[in-house]
Image: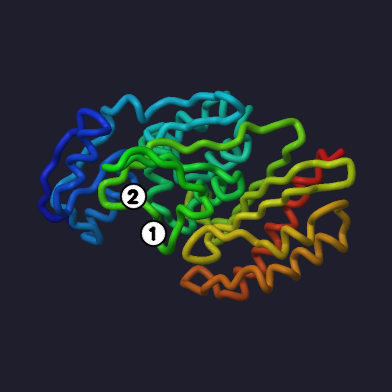
Amino acid sequence: MKPAPFAYAKARSLDHAIELLGQDGAKLLAGGQSLIATLNMRLSSPRILIDINGITGLKGIAVDDGRLTIGALVRHAEAERSPDIVQHAPLIAAAMPHIGHPAIRNRGTIGGSIAFADPAAELPACLLALDADIAITGPDGARTVKAESFFQGLFETTLAAQDVLTAIRVPAASPKMRYGFAEFARRHGDYALLGLAASARAEARGLSDVRLAFFGAGTTPLRAGRAEAALAGDIDGRKVEAAIAALDNDLDPPGDLQGSGPFKKHLAGVLLRRVVGQLAETVS
């Protein structure tokens, strides 16, 4: 199937892109790895595509004042190879090889993946686990939204019609921070049946500030608050089992063609056990 007819415009600047988004039926084109598929299946029928790939201000990776900033137009492959991301955002570095396949990572963008807000995608959960900020610019100027508030529902975010996601910002990793990542997919590169991104602070006696962000478990990435609380302090087998049991109240994953809800809940416990092992490996 081919897409419905649409017009095309190349934005000269961020302000120009915001102006063009004021047209009825306008949609942004960045990497296009999700958009082109929905166009070809006629799940999306924009009247005009606005190409933002030439806006240099949306590119680049930088570390400043204890925070790592990743521009919206940074390609997945660039992020995967970035020494700054490996050093300052190891959770994102761990997730990158799981995103699609090399051809997709060569074109797909960080901002596009986050704005698309697929609940089975890796990056939204990573942002939730890292307590990230999402930078947005619209007709009324720039603002910042916490990842916790950004994802609103299935493929829904706080982005308004003329908003452009410009960057993400995460706290730079410190020596006390620990990270864990695991997912289960039928084939490497496919969307995960279920996945988990996690962060925690290593203390003299175990872990604190545990953040567990599951993806593929609902319509948005989800924090598992009761399981987080169960893991505070020293880590031992009983605490891990208590955290797994707490997932019964934290998660209610819907069943689909890939697996039933109870199967996915069981899988959540399996992944939690693996990720806790990663978090606890280097706790002093």
Of badges 2 and 1, the one in the foreground is 1
Looking at the image, can residue 255 be seen? Answer: yes
Identified by mark 2, the residue type is Ser
In the rendering, at what x and y percent does residue 246 appear?
73, 69
Task: Answer above or below: position of 61 versus 225.
Answer: above
Q: Quadrant of the N terminus?
A: bottom left
Looking at the image, can residue 31 be seen? Answer: no
In the rendering, at what x and y percent does residue 84 appear?
57, 25
Mark with earlier residue (2, 1):
2
Q: Residue at x 57, y 30 (%)?
A: 67
Label 2 secondary element: loop
Instruction: Name the colouring of the figure.
Output: rainbow
Within 10 Å of the Cα at label 1, are there few (<14), some (14-19), or many (20+) other Cα atoms? some
Q: Which residue is mark 2?
A: 34
Within 10 Å of the Cα at label 2, are there few (<14), some (14-19), or many (20+) other Cα atoms? some
Quadrant hosting residue 42: bottom left
Task: Answer above or below: position of 9 versus 210.
Answer: above
Q: Residue at x 72, y 38 (%)?
A: 177
Quadrant hosting residue 12: top left
For residue 244, the mark is: none
Left or right, residue 184 beside residue 273? left
For residue 155, the mark is: 1
Nearest to the observer: residue 141 or residue 268: 141
